Image (cartoon, rainbow, N blue to C red):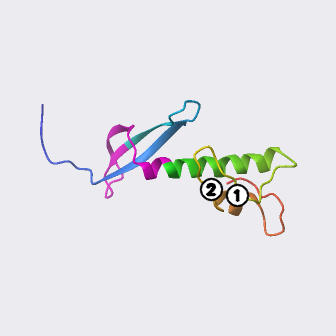
Amino acid sequence: MVTGTPKFNGLTIATMTADFTNPTVKLECQAAFVSSSTGRTHGWSIGQSWSRETIQKLGELRDLMERDLAHLHFSDGDYTNPTTSATGVTAPGGIGEHLGVGPGGEDVPSV
């Protein structure tokens, strides 16, 4: 093994995958070790273990994504009222409300 001083000074999440089909949610990510001065990636790592807060926020994100999809695909979906998910988390207003509907209630294009 060779040792030395790392040239990277940061870590960033590159991709993530969540599987909600099992009783226990599986969340995995690929993270990059990066240099903020050069922008170069010096290595990769995989994350698979998460805090209770992270899993709770993932449940909130799932709820908001489902609401956005319901707005796009159901003409009678209840898009404006928060829902309670299987995680027990009430989904507050979020990015879907701001990106999915224009000031006059019309659909806006995805970004």
Q: Quadrant of the C terminus?
A: bottom right
Q: Element type at marker 1?
A: loop
**Mark 1 nearby-residue class (10 Å; few <14, some 14–19, many ≥20):** some
Give residue 107's position: percent from left, percent from top.
Answer: 81, 57
Looking at the picture, does residue 92 appear above or below residue 30? below
Q: Which residue shows up at 79% across the image and 48% down it?
A: 72
Q: Identify residue type, mark 1.
A: Pro
Q: Which residues are magenta?
A: 32-55
Is residue 21 a member of the stretch shown in magenta?
A: no
Is residue 45 rendered to the left or right of residue 101? left
On the image, numbered disc 1 is attached to which residue?
82
Say which label, 1 or 2, has the lower sequence index.
1
Is residue 7 rendered to the left or right of residue 71? left
The single residue placed furthest to the front in the displayed view is 88
Q: Nearer the viewer, residue 54 or 108?
A: 54
Looking at the picture, does residue 109 appear above or below residue 105? above
Mark 1 near mark 2, Cβ–Cβ under 8 Å?
A: yes
Give residue 88's position: percent from left, percent from top.
Answer: 59, 49
On the image, numbered disc 2 is attached to which residue?
90
Give residue 2's position: percent from left, percent from top.
Answer: 12, 35
Name which quarter of the figure residue 28 lies in.
top left
Give residue 110's position: percent from left, percent from top.
Answer: 71, 53
